[in-house]
Amino acid sequence: MSEFISRGYVLAWVLVLLVVVPVASATGGVYDIEVLINAPDNFTLDKSNSYKVIIKSNETVSPGVNVTVVREIFNESVRVYRKEGNYSFKSHVTKKFQWTPKVPGNYTICANVTYVSVNDSDAANNWMCQKIVVLNVTAGDDDEGNVTFGNFSCDLSVRVSTKKFFYNSSESLGIKVVIEDVNHSGIEHGFILAYWIEDLFGNVVKARYEKSYIMNLSETRSYNPKAMDISDSEAYVVKAEIVDAGCNDSNAGNDFNESMILVKGALVEGDGGARGESIIEITKVSPVKTTFGDIISVSVDVYRGDTSKYSLSVWAERPSDGFDVSEKSTVHLKNKYTEYSLKVPVVVKSNCNERYKDGNYELIVEGLGVRETKRIVLSGLSSALCKTETVTKWKWKVKKETKKDEENVDSGAEKAEKVPDFVVEFVSWEENVSFGDEFVTGVEMRNNKGVAVNVSVYSYVIDGRARMSEGLAEDGVWKKSWTGNKRGIVIGAGDLVVVNLTNRMQRYVTGNYTLKVKVKVKGDVERVIDRGIYVFEPEVVDDFFRVWCNATDRKTYLFLENGGTHEKEVVVLSPGRAGVRRRVVVDGGEWKQIAYFGRVDVFVVECGDEEFVCRPEHEDYDEELEARGDEVVMMGSGGKMSFVDWVIEKLWLFFGRR
């Protein structure tokens, strides 16, 4: 009781001091804060590329200025990267960042100062954008022995192919744009293609569409706009152009092609709109050259427009007659006016009976009224699927044991290798993950039993006997158990099924562990396959601390890497409230949850001049703030806390601390 009263007296004195002692005002003066980007014109695909962001003031700020900078990267109009950072400086600060692009093409890097703790006289220079090009190139040596890029020779050609010459008004055109490497260099690289439609006077009637693609053997792009809505018959020209070949193109004369069409028909209200048309883009096929019986991973970007069709199918076929040489994988796209990025496995038929010839085949992606194709090469047989029967014959002699004549007896025997009745294999997996990362493991199961079987399958990461991961159940809920992502399926006789299992690292200790998949066939033994997986560090705050934002439970955790006990100052932000500073004590080797009344929307860990911002990454976060009319405010070193927030914080520090 006395301890409680003493704490009450202390709190009362603190309140008195709040009223008597004025709070320090924000840094005075007017300054000009400017942001600059220093990036190379070209980035290299699948490599870590560096660029710099410079934030500076027109004059030195004392004691300093705090800013919040949002970095974003766009591929055309699609944002592919976003990161927010908080920095402190007196005159300027230069930050170096890394980015590893996964798709070649044209990009834009932007930096935007969203918060300044001082009076900024010119907000116009608080943002900057710089265009870059991501190239898929190979390394070589120039004449002087220096490393150069994209120095291989090629000859790309483009051709516009139309189904017919006459079209009715608003009819789908079904145009094909075919790109080929005449030299057959065989080097995979990026290139940029553009196509559009003009009238005979050179006026653009269907907007120019420009995008980057990956070139292997050849490419075919589907361009399927509706014909123009007109009342008279008119002629139009469909044009296509290779904007950037991504290599040393030896013949620029075949980089452009056009084809004339004639559109006839009555006036129809509305033109359907560009976003009403569905689009399918095959972004990557891996591998392009493989054997029969292999699994091909197909990456597809899809936009479902104003169509009632929702099914998308992917398969391989023989180009001569359209005969399927693979199983057909089907995906349902439920929402209109929605973009999807998919990775679909295609299981090529085994060809153990050598029914199909080695050579070129077509990979087909079809749905939503659009059809895309890509050439692949299939040759040879899979040794894992097509077992070669080995027959061994031998002879022996029977010795004469009686006076009767005995003949040498030739005997033969056949010894055949048995095909497993049920096969389980990895088809896709992650070799490196970080704490809190979601990762998907693809498991192939082939039933050779001759009858349908009931199968259960699940995956987890283990360290000796300790479970290190949690699994995503079919209902979308994360479960902290060995069988968290368990799936129950029925596999027909002779069928092959690929199942994707999602896990997330639940415990954080850097090192090498084991990813295990367990498959139980009803009435049969349990099958286990495993492979190594490496868990690496999350975001580095400084030499001691690591940070993890859990978007699922919307809380934040701070981890002390080394032993001992350390304190770290954090700024806790909640919607509609200014930042509340407090120090958090973290024990070595343990995660400390940072929570403000049980929940954190945004928080900042300060490490000298560096600050790390963490916020929930779920898609509806910004919409939630907008619906509540809340605004997240970052408090700088010269900021002022409201009286109510100050009292709440002090009460929490006195009575909420253990």
Image (spheres, rainbow, N blue to C red):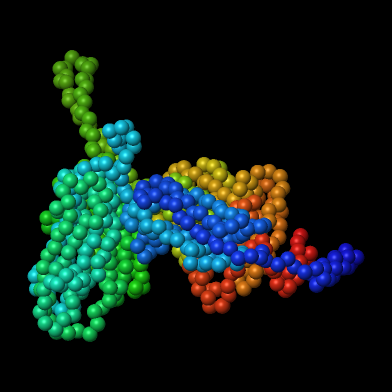
For the N terminus, the image quarter is bottom right
**Quick one: 340 or 637, which is closer to the camera?**
637
Q: Residue furthest right?
A: 2
Task: List x then y, in percent, for residue 352.
Answer: 21, 45
**Relative to residue 400, is residue 413 depicted above or below?**
below
- Residue 46 located left or right of residue 382: right
**Quick one: 476 or 205, which is closer to the camera?**
205
- Residue 409 located left or right of residue 84: left
For image coordinates 25% across by 66% down, the residue present is 208
Task: List x then y, in percent, for residue 29.
Answer: 64, 65
Q: Quadrant of residue 316?
A: bottom left
**In this view of the protein, can residue 15 be seen by the observer?**
no
For image coordinates 34% across by 53% down, the residue present is 133
For image coordinates 54% across by 56% down, the residue present is 56
**Quick one: 38 or 350, which is closer to the camera?**
38
Task: List x then y, in percent, for residue 421.
Answer: 33, 47
Q: Quadrant of residue 321?
A: bottom left
- Residue 81 located left or right of residue 631: left
Q: Residue furthest top?
A: 403
**In this view of the protein, can residue 78 be seen by the observer?**
yes
How many numbered discs, if any? 0
Task: List x then y, in percent, for residue 645.
Answer: 71, 71
For the C terminus, the image quarter is bottom right
For image coordinates 65% across by 44% down, the residue present is 562
